[in-house]
Structure formats: structure tokens, C-alpha cells
Image (tube, rainbow, N blue to C red):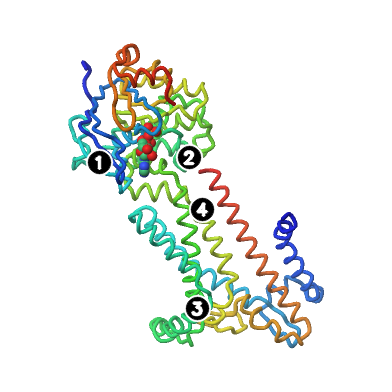
Amino acid sequence: MIIGLVIVILLPFILGIGLYIKSILLLEDQSLFQLLFSGDWRPLSGKFGFLPFIISSVWVTTIALMIAGPICLLTAVHLTQYAKPWVLKLMQPVIDILAGIPSVIFGVWGILVIVPFISDYLAPFLGKQTSGYSIIAGAIVLAVMVIPFILNILIEVFKTLPDELKEASLSLGATKWQTIKLVLLRKAFPGVISAFGLGVSRAFGETIAVLMVVGNVASIPKGLFQPGYPLPALIANNYGEMLSIPLYDSALMLAALVLFVVVMLFNMGSRFAISRLEEKV
Amino acid sequence: MEDRTKIKIKDLNLSIGKQKILKDINLEIPEKKITVILGPSGCGKTTLLKSLNRLTDLYPDMRVSGNIMIDNVDILHTNEDITLLRQKMGLLSQRPYPLPMNIYNNVAFGLRISGRKKKRYLDKRVEHYLKMANLWDEVKDRLKDPASALSIGQQQRLCLARGLAVDPDIILADEPTSALDPISSEAIEKKFVELKQQYTIVMVTHVLRQARRIADYVVFMYLGEIIEQGTASEVFDNPKQDMTKQYLKGSFN
Ligand SMILES: Nc1ncnc2c1ncn2[C@@H]1O[C@H](COP(=O)(O)OP(=O)(O)O)[C@@H](O)[C@H]1O
Ligand SMILES: [Mg+2]
């Protein structure tokens, strides 16, 4: 048992160190700064600029969160503060089921519904032209995927708020909405931030569903309707295929390391914030 | 009772689902006195207190019937604005729950909510009520600190100040000293005795000695019913019901 525990605890370090060792080859050849901030991706000429992938990842994740965040917040407030208790009881398994759907299914749904919707309706409506395979398509699919995930955490956050706090505010003459806005949301703020942070760490690493709709073109995207190429898609698409090119596998390992570090940071930061919230409550 | 009645409860029944929590409560609470509610835990004391403030509205599956007359308005069946009604009562709970904001804003909260926002006015009121709760000297130099940074005893006094700031007639206190150290408890107790000049106080407690020290009127509850009520000397020195006698001997708890 102890051995199992030690392995589990060491696993992240082993993974991180392994990725680092594998990427050393490239890091000895070129500076990290140059790799991260150059947009020049031409593996055949030994140019490994990661910027297009990093920017794609950041765009897709940010927009997904901008869509999912407010929806989740409003839904969680509604379910925990306004809805009848049975509605929440009914919704929780539904949310769990949504969270358990394999991501490839969201990808297929994205191709069948979101991509054509963007190319035929949304883009023309805004006076743009696009195949539909784009940053925005990736972001929408990703948003739908992380909604159950974030919503679950937010519901927990709002449920841990003590009834007495609500009662205190109401007894001072606040209306229900004033209580929610001025007291509950403020009290829940660290929890909300953590839920979003965990959502980011989940979204940033999501691979298949995004890869299927995002277009996968390795240049810096100039708009939301342009295709992008997030880091996980880069790794999944190319690992095992392009390895005859010198340093290519080392470059993919570095991409994985960047992904790993970002996800770990968001994850740990959010968990830390949540634990602080629980202490205070 | 020779004192003027502030709150009159008639045939109050309260249930959640099939569970009856309060049964046929009939009670008169006199003005500007301390009425102490006694009884073993789970007998419905907190629920009774909450129904006085219509906090029972929060629980959708709670069913309430009967009348609660406060100043001759039946708060269970009134068209009056509930938020105004609640401002007539300051509430202290078992543990202090400061609002998630700084000390100053905790006290100013109720005032701002009811539209009084001028800084100079608020400054004066905040100082006044913090002094009233004996907290001013300890916090005057750190009004902008989060309320959660205060000790539990200070937080409870802050909650008192916050409740007084909306200018209630009634103070509802649910075991307000149970989370406090003896010194803070005594401070709150003394404060209550002072405050009854101006306020009608209803306090739940499970500390018999505390009840003996400060009660003018005593209500003894058991399993959702009122077993006995009367002046402190009637109930403590001359209890009529066996149940009350046993409780006072300390054979419950
Ligand atoms: N929101 C609620 N939902 C279900 N049962 C409750 C609720 N509030 C109180 N009760 C029940 O009502 C009874 C009285 O509780 P309470 O008023 O808190 O008693 P006391 O304050 O005297 O300890 C208890 O049996 C308790 O389990
Ligand atoms: Mg209680």
C-alpha cells in the first residue's frame, strides 16, 4: 500500500522529469525563450516556434471559459438558490452523465452541428468567410464539454455556504437578490475562481474533441474564424509519424512539458484556493 | 402578564413533510424584557425563533400555520414588505457569521440596503453601534480589516452591532454565547441586560445559570411544545410541571 501511495505521489514528478529529459536535446540546441515566442514552425528546417500552438490554446481556452463561465455561474445560482430542491436533485445525475460522455462524441457533434452552423450562419451573419473549422468552433465545443465539469464544482461551492450567512443578510432587510449579489457571491468568490481555474486546466489539455473541429493549421490565428492548432492537437496528430525529422520528438516532448506545467499550475492553484475557502467556512 | 405584549403567538404549528416541529405554540412575549427560551436540543427553539423573523420562508418544504402578531400585525399573513418586517428584528445566531466584507461595511450593510448611503451619516452610525456593542475601542483603528480577522467573541459583538444598526425593536438571539469564551459570554450577557431598556429580547439558551442570571420571563419547551411559561421566579422557584422540574434539576441534556 505504501509503495502504491509513493508511486501515486511521485507520478507527477516522474512524468515532468521524463518530459524534461526528453526535451533537453531541443533545449540544448535552441533557447527556451526563442522556442516559446517564435511563430516560425518549420520542422524540416529545424525551426520549432511554438507560438502558433500556444496562442491557439490560449484563444480556444479563454473563449471557451468566457462562454461556459457565465452560463455555469447563473445556472449554479439558480439551481442552489431559486429552484425547488427536487430540480437540483434531478439535475445532478444529468450533469454527471454529461460530464461522463467521451470527448470524441462531443467532437463528432461539433463536426455535424457546430462547424456547419459557423460556416453557414454565424460567419456570414458577421460578414466573414470560413470553412467552419476554426478557433471559435473549438471554443464552443470545449465550452459545452467543460460546462458540466465547472457546474458540478460551482454547485458544491454554493452548497457549502452556510444557511446562517443567508439568514443574517435577510434579517438585516436585504432582499433575496441583494443577499445573493452582495453576500453569497462575494463569499463564494474564491470558490468560483477555483472552479474556473479547474475548468481552464481541464480545457487547456482537452485533445480529441478540439482537434476534430479546430482546423489544425500551424500558423498564428488572426481571428476567431481562422483555424488554429492547440498544443494537445499538435502532440496527438504528430507523435509517432514525424519522428524521422531530427529533434521533432524532442519538440513534441517540450510541447507536452509546457502543457503539463500549465495544467498543473492551474490545477494546484485552484485546489489551493478551494481549500482556503473551506477553512474559512 | 402585567407588561405590554410585544409579540403574541397563537396556535403556531410548523412541520416539515410529516415531521411536526412546532405544535400549538401559544406565547406572549412582553416588551422590553428578556424572555429566555429553554429546552433540550432539538425541541424546536431555533425554529421558533426563525419563524418570528419569517426565515422559515427559506425552506420551501416547511409548512407554517397560526398567527404571529407583532405590534398587532400578523406577520404570517401580512402584505407588508418582508424586508421591512425583518429589519424590526436583529438576529444573533449560535455562531457569529460576519458578512464577507470589512468591519465597517458589516455594520453599514443594513443601512445601505435601506438606502442610507451618505458617508458622514454612515460613519456616525457605524461608530455609534460599534460603541453600543462594546467593540469600538478594539476595532476603531482597523475598520477596513475583514471581519473574519476578528476573534469569535469580537465577531459576535460585531453581529450584534450589525443587527442593532437597522434600528430594530426586537433582538432575537439563538444561544448567542455558546461559541464564546466565558469573558466574551459575560460581556454579551451584560449587554443584553443593558439593552432591555430599549429592546424586547428573546434569547434561546441551554445554560441554566445564564437563564437564571438574566431572564425576566422563561419559556420551557420540549419536543416542539411549550410545557411551561411564566416569570423567571414563577418558573425557576415554583415550576408547576414535572418535566420542568426535572429539566431544572439537570436531568436532561
Ligand atoms: N431545515 C430543516 N429541515 C429538516 N428538519 C429540520 C430543519 N430545521 C430543523 N429541523 C428539525 O426540527 C427539530 C427542531 O430543530 P431546532 O429548532 O433546530 O431545535 P433546537 O434549536 O431546539 O435545538 C429538529 O428535530 C430538527 O431536526
Ligand atoms: Mg438550536
Could you tell me which residue is drawn at 48 percent across and 60 percent down?
A152
Residue beneath label 3, please? A105
Q: Are marks 1 and 3 on the same chain?
A: no
Q: Residues within 10 Å of mark 2 (few under 14, many from 20)?
A: some
- Whichever of callouts 3 and 4 sits on the residue coming sooner in the sequence is 3
Q: In the rendered view, does A69 fall on the left or right side of B20?
A: right
- Find residue B64 and name its label: 1
Quadrant position of residue A21: bottom right
Q: Are marks 3 and 2 on the same chain?
A: no
- Name which residue type carries label 3: Ile
State yes or no: Cβ of the residue under disc 3 lies below 8 Å from any atom of ligand 1. no
Closer to the observer: label 2 or label 1?
A: 1
Q: State whether residue A252 is above or below residue B204.
A: below
Task: Write down the chain letter for disc 1.
Answer: B
Q: Residue B108 appears at what percent x and percent y?
A: 39, 37
- Front residue (pair A265, A18): A18
Q: Regarding mark 2 in the picture, which secondary structure is present there?
A: loop
Q: Regarding mark 4 in the picture, which secondary structure is present there?
A: helix
Q: Regarding mark 3 in the picture, which secondary structure is present there?
A: helix
Residue beneath label 2, please? B102
Quadrant in which the N terminus of chain B is drawn: top left
Residue beneath label 4, please? A191
